[in-house]
Amino acid sequence: MTTSGQRTWVVVEQLDTLLSQVRDQIIPDLTARDLIRADGRSVFQRHGGTRYATRVQLSAALTYLDASTWAIKSIAVLLRISGL
């Protein structure tokens, strides 16, 4: 004769097995090798590389501001010429 506690334990074990199977299908199998960069550091550490994107973005913003300044100056000259 089984008790309620024993039945609960069987259900918990079955759920654990089922969840493990689902997890294994959904989450890719990562090994320690997958979490190491070519330089030997963990993928969770900052790489310490040069931040090219920041310089590119700043350069683009500066170009935009230069173009905007040129356009504003040109409009001001045209307004002066036209007498407005």
Image: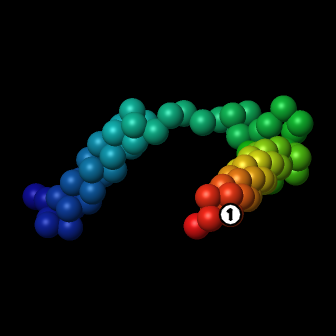
The total number of labels drawn is 1
Side (left or right) of 38 relative to 57: right
Q: Secondary structure at mark 1?
A: helix
Q: Outermost residue toward the left?
A: 1
Q: 12 and 77: which one is in front?
A: 77
Side (left or right) of 82 relative to 64: left
- Residue drawn at 62 percent across, 58 percent down: 82
Side (left or right) of 67 relative to 12: right
Q: Is residue 36 above or below residue 81?
A: above
Measured as percent of width and height from the top left, residue 33 is found at 73, 33
Please state, as top left, top right, bottom left or bottom right, where the N terminus lies in the image.
Answer: bottom left
Measured as percent of width and height from the top left, residue 3 is found at 14, 65
- Residue drawn at 20 percent across, 67 percent down: 5
Colouring? rainbow
Q: 51 and 80: which one is in front?
A: 80
Q: 22 and 34: which one is in front?
A: 34
Q: Is residue 47 visible?
A: no
Please state, as top left, top right, bottom left or bottom right, where the C terminus lies in the image.
Answer: bottom right
Q: Is residue 27 above or below residue 55?
A: above
Measured as percent of width and height from the top left, residue 34 is found at 69, 34
- Residue drawn at 68 percent across, 58 percent down: 81
Q: Is residue 15 visible?
A: yes
Measured as percent of width and height from the top left, residue 43 is found at 74, 45
Disc 1 target residue: 80
- Residue drawn at 29 percent across, 42 percent down: 18
Snapshot quadrant of residue 31: top right
Q: Amino acid at mark 1?
A: Arg
Q: Classify mark 1: residues with Cα within 10 Å, few (<14), some (14-19) or many (20+).
A: few
